[in-house]
Every structure is written in structure tokens, then in C-alpha cells.
Image (spheres, coloured by chain):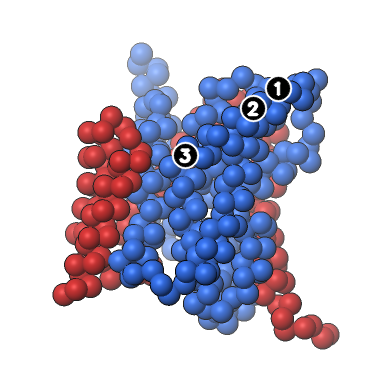
Chain colours: A red, B blue
Amino acid sequence: MSLDPALWPYLFVILAGFLPTEIWRAAAVVLAHGLDEDSEWLIFVRAVATALVAGVITRIVLVPTGDLVAVPLAIRVGAVAGGFVVFFLARRSMLLGVLAGEAIMIAGAWLSEAR
Amino acid sequence: MNAPAVDRTHWYGRGIKAAFRSVQVGVLFASYVGFGGLIHDVDFPLAAAVLSTALIWALPAQLLLVGAFAAGTAAPVVALAIGLSSVRLLPLVVTILPYLRGRGGRRGLLFLAAHYVAITLWVEGMRHLPTLPAEGRRPFYFGLVTVAHGGAVLSTFVGYALAGTLPHALATGLLFLTPISFLLALTRNARDLVDRLSLAFGLALAPVMALYAGTLDLLWTGLVGGTAAYAAHRLWEKRA
């Protein structure tokens, strides 16, 4: 079989990326068939989904990959805590909370680089 | 019965407006700027990266894919890793779909709607859709999708063009956008006890599962944390 090597990245996207993600979305369409928006089942699945997304958050902060690894744990946790506190002080403003967390993170990353 | 076209256009426009005002969508764009920078660094073709945004539409999977491609990992191994980590999409789609079904909805349209579910669209959808009239939900959602998807593609180009020019501390800041914004969005979206508990349990369980539950740790975090939160909610309701 001969395949133009330039096409390989595209095939890779479809075979190794598209198919294994789309299969779950399609399965979900089948599973959700007939479920009512107030159904008790849905409350349970929503709890699972929320806990799962929450898990993504802690994992990125505590067990990071990429450039975040170089930032000390105390700064990563401090940036989350700072953003959270400002979010509540600013009457649940996402924008201000995110900006506060980012300010701590970027300052921390810059300082830990400078040392 | 379908809603009149004028109405659909109105709700589609409302979705577009909501996307432009969403911090979460802004965060998505910034994250795709980071993705654009990464593909430039590892020499992944820009067009294939744009294709991955259209077809995969889940940034963690795309990052994994590009990283693995650059490392020369075999396609079946990558497919398995992405398949396992993408189970998280299933509960997201199951919970948002009842809002998108509409009346007499065509099945094909549902699969298309499901294709665009990822954490960002789920968070924004679950925030707005329950408050909208039934006939406005689907067009509103596709309005959100239009901006989020178009902007993500554009951001990939921007990141590709900017690659290497961003100061290191700023690039680190881009990576931090995801956790901080998801945390605040989930907190804002938490309406009742079961939402708050599942959020708290998920946050607390993840490090334990990361240590002991292997590659499916996120799924276990969701199942165990979600089940515990749901059980607490049932007990609470019985007492009340």
C-alpha cells in the first residue's frame, strides 16, 4: 500500500483522534434517547459529569504537564485560591476571578523563572 | 412542529451574542492560541490541526494527538489513549441533549449537536439552555457553537503565527486559564446541593484517583464522586 507521507497527519487525525472521541458522543445520543430533562437519572449523570470536570481541574493544578510543571506547587494552589476569593468578593464575577488567578500565576511564573 | 424561521434566527443571534460575552469562550480562544503555538513548535501541519479542531473538538485530545504524533507514537496506541480519556464526553452529552432535542427533532441534527459538546459548550449550555423557551434552545446552542468553533480555528492561526514570540510566563498563564475558568464556571453554575457536592467531591478525589486508579482515573473520579453526591442528595430529600 502506498500512501503519500504528507497525507499521514490527516489520516492520523481521523483514525487516532476523530473516531475514538466521536464514538462516545454517538453512544451518548443513543443513551440519552427518551430521557426527559427532569428525569432522576439525569440528576445522577449530571453529578458524575460535574465531579469528572472538577477532577480535570485538580489534576491540571496538582499533576500538571508542560510549562506549568516549572511553577512551584504553592504558586499554582495560591493562584487558584486567589482567583476563587476574588470571584466571591466581586459578587461572582468570572472575569475578575480569572484575571486575579492569572495575575498571580503569571507573576509567579515570571518570578520563579527569574530566580 | 418546527418554530417559525424568524424565531429561530432570533435565538441563533442570541446564542452568538452570548458566546461573545462568555468568559469561558474567551478562555477557549486563548487555549487554542496555545495549541497553535504548540503545533508550530512540533511541525504539525496547520491544515491538519484545523481539521483536528473541526473533527475532534476537544482540546485535551488534540494536545495528546499532536504530542503523540510528534513523538512518533503508533496510531493504535494513540487512538486507545484518546478513546479512554474521551469517555468523559459521554455524561456531558447525555445531560445536555434533552435540552437540544426540541419537538420532532431530526436524529441527524442531534448527532451534529452532540459533536460540538465539549467542556466549554457544556458549561455554557447548561448555564443558559434551562432558562430558555424550548423552541429557542437548539438555535441558541448552534449560535454558541458557531462563534466558539470559528473563533477556535482563528485562534489556532493566531497562535501559529505568534509561536515563539510569547514570553514564557504568559505562555504558562495560557495553560492556567483552563483550570481556573472551569472551577469558577462550575461554581457559578452549581444550583443545588447535588451540584455543589459533586464539585467538591470531584476536586477532592482527583489526586487520590490520579495516584491509584491508573489511566481511567478521571472516569473513576466522576463515578465515585458523582455517586456519593447523588446518594447524599437522595438522603437529604428523604429527610426533608
Residue at 74%, 77% in the rendered image: A7
- Labels 2 and 3 within one chain: yes
| Residue type indicated by callout 1 | Asp
Give percent across and percent down for residue B63.
Answer: 52, 66
Where does residue A89 sit, x and y in percent of width and height?
22, 33
At 23% from the left and 54% from the top, the residue drawn is: A104
Measured in 3D between alpha carbons, the distance from the residue under mark 1 to the one under mark 2, in whole angstroms, is 6 Å
**Mark sitting earlier along the chain (2/3):** 2
**From where the camera sits, is residue B117 visible?**
no
Q: Is residue B208 above or below residue B194?
A: below
Instruction: Name the image quarter holding residue A70.
Output: bottom left
Q: CA distance from mark 3 to mark 1?
A: 23 Å
Outermost residue toward the top in this view:
B240
Tag 3: residue type?
Ser
| Residue found at the far bottom of this picture | A2
Query: Could you say which disc has been placed on residue B7 in the image?
Result: 1
* Foreground residue among A31 and B191: B191
Label 2 marks which chain's residue? B
Q: Amino acid at mark 2?
A: Trp
Please give the residue where the numbered disc 3 appears in the rendered image.
B22
Above/below status of B111 relative to B70: above
Residue at x 32%, y 57% (from the top left corner)? A61
The quarter of the picture where residue A5 lies is bottom right
